[in-house]
Structures are given as C-alpha cells and as structure tokens.
C-alpha cells in the first residue's frame, strides 16, 4: 500500500534559552531527543526551524529605553520628532515609543487609518464611509477623530491605542500631539525631523519625505542599528522586529545568524548522516479574517536559512489535472496518470495552466508561516519546529 502520510509539522520542546547559550548544540540535541522520544526517523530534506526569539536571546540582543532615547536624541536632535505609521501593539511598539519619547521634547504621532500596516483597525471602513471621511486625503486632528469616531477599542486586546500611545508619550515627559493621515508627507507640516515606523513600506515613506523637504529622516530600521553604550543592535533592521522583554527593554531581531543554521545542519549531518535543511523564523504571513490582522510585523519571515530552502514551490495542481487532462479517468488509472505527469513535470512551471492556483510565495515564507502556527506565541514551550515530508509529492512512497 502507498504511504498515507504527507507533511507533518511537530513542535519540539527545548530548555529556556539564556544569553550565551550554545544554541547550535541545544537545537541539535533537542531534535535528536525528540526523534527518539517521538519515534520518528530523521530523513533527508527534513526541516528544522527555530524561532527568532531564541536566537536573539542566545545572542543577548537587547536594548533599553535609555539606549533608544540616546540614539534618537543623537540622530534627530532631541526637540520635536514626528513618529509616523507605527503598528498598534503593546508588545511590538510600546517600548520603542517610550524610548523615542524619552529622547524628544515633543512627539507628533501620526497614525495611519482606518488601520495600521498589519491590519489592526482603529475604525472600520464602514465608519469612514458613514462619516464622509476620505482616508487618502483627509488629515484628522485628535479632536476631530474623537468627534467622529469616539473611543474605539481593539476587538481582541480591549485597548484604545490612541489613548494608550498618548499616555506613554506624556509619561516619558514629552509633549504629545496626535494626528491621523496616510500620506507620509502630512507630518512635514508639523516637523521636518521624522521617524517612519512602517515595516514593509519604509523605503517609499523615506523617499517621499526626503523629496518633500524632510531634514532628519530615519526609519525605525535606522534606530539602534549600532550599539549604544554596549547595548545590542541590529545592523540591518534596527528596531524593526523587536519585542517587549521588560517594561524597560526590548529584545531586538537577531543579528547575523547564517553561520548558526549552517552549523546545525552540519551537526545533524554528522549525527545522522542525513542532509536536513535549517531556518530561523519570525512572524508568519497570513490574515486573520475576524480581526483582519495579517500578522507579519517582522521585517522578514526568515532572517537566515540553508540553501535548500531557496526558491518557490514548483507544483502541479492535482484537481486541475483530474478535472481537465484526465477527466475521463478514475480510480487507479487516474492515480497512475497523475503520478506520471508529476514525474515528468518541467523544472519551472511558472505561467503554465497546470500550476494555476498553487501558492505563489517563497518557500521560506510558506514554511515560516507553518512554523509560526505550529509553535504559537504563548506557553507551548516549543520554539523548535521539525517538519517532515514538505518536499514530498503524490509520487513519494
């Protein structure tokens, strides 16, 4: 009988990681122990993935509010700072905002609306329509926003992020002014010194601001991109991808970790004789149909991965073959015909109808999303994910 199991994703428990831990050794031993405990065999082209959080923790990649404040003060002058397009998150942005506000006398906070970049809504599109507000051109003051929409709270967290962020700024001793707009250039009516906090559109925002006369223009990726007083940093992403560690500290996105994934791959090859792919993953990229959040608050899904995870899927759509090419077949004849098509498929199916409907995303983005859903973000205690059968297809026995 043919093999009946396809892709399997397993969460693997590991010790609590601390700064200075040998992560390559811990991940390798955790996987080997899990295989023995779970009764599964390590195979070629299996995938080992670990959360970015344990990588950054092992690296000791942290920064404090005072570190962020000093960097902001040095780069933007310490007077009035525009802070535009932050995401609405206590975990992701609140400590960053504390640092920014501690490094300025006044913060003009410009929030995108009706939602932030990753889908957290301040108000609904229906509410904008009802009030006759055009989010593409209208700039709202806080007073006008309250008059139109009142005090809206996030459906899952119960937080009014406008009120929450305003309070954070004032607690840090800075004056706060809040506006709502979607054109980054709107902030220049208030200050020429700006930190643009958007993640995936940051290059465009910086370009538009500089072209429109902005003077000190920085992305969040350029704050904490070098150590401050011996702190951690991220040379490529700065504060992007950071998470709250304590009320006074953020854990930054991991620094260079390509050597780590290759080390783990080599260790597993030595221990098992199998060539396993390895990656580091952060947020997946998928949309919640209820809360409308599409999750990806990290600058990339995977900051490091072994070469076998490069590229995109190259798959045939089985139901297309069944309904079109082989509509006249059924049973074993249909099964064998489809297997034959898979065996002889082209190395590059881009643009061919038989691949229409297969997911057009990079392997690392797809696998990272699977890992993020497998490990969760709470108390599962499985920061390592072991995936088998991802590269199998209908012909694999």
Image (cartoon, rainbow, N blue to C red):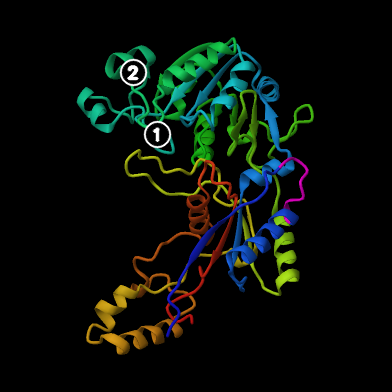
Q: For residue 20: magenta?
A: yes
Q: At 25% from the left edge and 79% from the top edge, which residue is drawn?
A: 324
Q: Is residue 369 magenta?
A: no
Residue denoted by label 2: 151
Q: Residue at left 49%, top 49%? A: 284
- Classed neighbour count for the residue bearing mark 1: other residues with Cα under 10 Å, few (<14), some (14–19), many (≥20): many
| Outermost residue, left side | 130
Q: Which residue is at the front of the view, 390 or 179?
A: 390
Q: Is residue 234 above or below residue 43?
A: above
Instruction: Name the spot of residue 35 as percent of width and height, x first.
Output: 62, 65
191, 63: nearer the viewer:
63
- Residue 100 on image: x %, y %: 60, 21
Q: Secondary structure at mark 2?
A: loop
Residue 263 screen position, x and y as percent: 74, 60
Q: Taking 53 as reference, is 182 above or below it?
A: above
**Between marks 2 and 1, how big is the CA–CA gap?**
15 Å
* Magenta portion: prevailing SS class: loop
Q: Position of residue 38 (x, y in %)?
A: 58, 64
Mark 2, other Cα within 10 Å: few <14 / some 14–19 / many ≥20? some
Task: Give the residue at x 33% y 44%.
Answer: 289
Rendered-image quadrant of the N terminus: bottom left
Highlighted range, magenta = 18-24
**SS at mark 1?**
loop
| Residue 108, numbered circle | none
Q: Earlier in the sequence, mark 2 or mark 1?
A: 1
Residue at the extreme bottom: 333
Reading the image, the residue beneath label 1 is 120
Picture quadrant of residue 25: bottom right
Above or below, 244 relative to 332: above
């Amino acid at each position: 009988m043919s093999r009946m199991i396809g892709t399997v994703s397993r969460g693997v428990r590991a010790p609590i990681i601390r700064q200075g831990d040998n992560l390559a050794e811990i991940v390798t031993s955790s996987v080997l122990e899990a295989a023995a405990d779970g009764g599964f065999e390590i195979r070629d082209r299996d995938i080992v993935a670990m959360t970015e959080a344990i990588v950054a923790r092992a690296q000791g990649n942290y920064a404090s509010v005072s570190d962020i404040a000093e960097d902001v003060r040095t780069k933007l002058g310490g007077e009035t700072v525009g802070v535009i397009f932050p995401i609405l998150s206590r975990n992701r942005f609140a400590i960053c905002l504390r640092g920014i506000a501690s490094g300025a006398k006044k913060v003009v906070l410009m929030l995108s609306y009706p939602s932030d970049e990753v889908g957290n809504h301040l108000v609904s599109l229906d509410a904008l329509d009802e009030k006759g507000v055009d989010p593409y051109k209208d700039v709202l003051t806080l007073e006008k926003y309250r008059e139109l929409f009142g005090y809206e709270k996030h459906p899952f967290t119960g937080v009014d992020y406008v009120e929450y962020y305003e309070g954070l700024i004032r607690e840090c001793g800075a004056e706060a002014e809040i506006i709502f707009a979607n054109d980054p250039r709107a902030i220049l009516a208030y200050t020429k010194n700006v930190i643009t906090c958007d993640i995936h559109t940051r290059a465009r925002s910086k370009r538009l601001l500089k072209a429109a006369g902005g003077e000190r223009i920085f992305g969040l990726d350029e704050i904490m991109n070098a150590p401050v007083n011996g702190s951690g940093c991220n040379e490529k992403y700065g504060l992007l991808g950071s998470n709250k560690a304590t009320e006074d500290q953020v854990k930054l996105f991991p620094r260079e970790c390509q050597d780590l994934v290759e080390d783990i791959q080599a260790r597993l090859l030595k221990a098992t004789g199998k060539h396993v792919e390895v990656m580091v993953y952060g947020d997946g990229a998928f949309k919640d149909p209820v809360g409308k959040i599409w999750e990806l608050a990290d600058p990339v899904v995977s900051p490091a991965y072994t070469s076998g995870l490069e590229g995109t899927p190259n798959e045939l759509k089985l139901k297309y073959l069944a309904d079109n090419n082989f509509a006249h077949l059924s049973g074993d004849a249909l099964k064998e015909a489809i297997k034959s098509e898979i065996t002889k498929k082209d190395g590059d199916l881009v643009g061919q109808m038989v691949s229409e409907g297969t997911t057009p995303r990079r392997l690392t983005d797809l696998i990272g999303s699977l890992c993020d859903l497998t490990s969760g973000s709470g108390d599962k205690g499985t920061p390592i994910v072991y995936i088998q059968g991802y590269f199998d297809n209908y012909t694999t026995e």
